[in-house]
Amino acid sequence: MTQNPFLISPQDLADVIGRDGLSIVDASWYLPAQNRFAKAEYAAGHVPGAVFFDQDDIVDPTSNLPHTLPNAAIFAEKVGALGLSDTDTIVVYDGMGVFSAPRVWWMFRTFGAKDVRLLDGGFPDWQAAGLPIEIETPPIDPARFSAQLDEDAAVFLPAMKAIVAEGAMQIADARPAERFAGVAPEPRQGVRAGHMPGAYSLPFLSLTEDGRLKSPEDLRKAFAAAGIDPDRPVVTSCGSGVTAAVINLALESLGNRQSKLYDGSWTEWGSAADTPVETGPRPGS
């Protein structure tokens, strides 16, 4: 089986730690209901040399939405201060395996980094392999990250409205099926329940197994079961733009270079006054 170019195994990462041009990023982030605290877990132990990427801080400071993309200048400043360069090989991971790290994988690529990998199985598999863990925060030498937003990678509200109205692209929703159908409430106040007209339900957990991305064959089965053609253009969405990136990672792993991520995701769409919302499963599903 061809190796996924976006993944790196714990042992393969352990073999190259310390090499010039390699940067490691702890991209852990958790929902309040998970009752886990990413910064505290990082302080208690992390992959040696890893810096912590705060997904609540590296955002657009003018937006009232969670996890909104910052502009290129802010992104460059923030990640440069972490010692990260766009010319590095950047390996990201999280504390669940495949949950929040794909969002940061997508962000680095969207702002111009050329070689970004995901640690296969994340920190749990690193620990399970008995590999070294560091408690101390590594010294950081500020770096230059030359950032430029790839406007083909992200979708914002005006374009999303047009996509929905015209049925111009497949829409894949990574939220749990109950939230997609509107039978479970949204966790954020003021956000309506349901989904965008024409969207398909593809919970991100259907693309993972034991904290790892599924095989290409199983990924294709998951897309087919959801009614999505993974070889055609897809725009992804979720609650706030984090787990949507798991779908983007899966699509890119299957060779789809036409995937986009709706940055405002359901928090923006469901709280807007002029956006159509449907409930129930997708007709025909």
Image (tube, grey):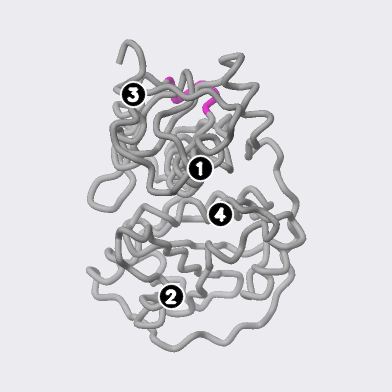
Decide which of tag 4 and tag 2 comes sooner along the chain.
2
Query: In the image, residue 283 lies at what x, y percent?
Result: 35, 12
Which residue in the protein does label 2 denote?
39
Query: In the image, residue 29 lies at what x, y percent?
Result: 42, 62
Decide which of tag 3 and tag 4 comes sooner along the chain.
4
- Magenta span: 229-234
Which residue in the protein does label 1 denote?
267
Which residue in the protein does label 4 denote?
67
Decide which of tag 1 and tag 4 comes sooner along the chain.
4
Q: CA distance from mark 1 to mark 4?
A: 10 Å
Q: Residue at x 61, y 83 (%)?
A: 140
Query: In the image, residue 76 lies at what x, y percent?
Result: 72, 64
- Which image quadrant: the C terminus? top left
Q: CA distance from mark 2 to mark 1?
A: 24 Å
Residue 42, picture quadrant: bottom left
Tag 3 secondary structure: helix
Any mark on residue 183, and which?
A: none
> Between tags 2 and 1, which lies in front?
1
Which residue in the protein does label 3 denote?
226
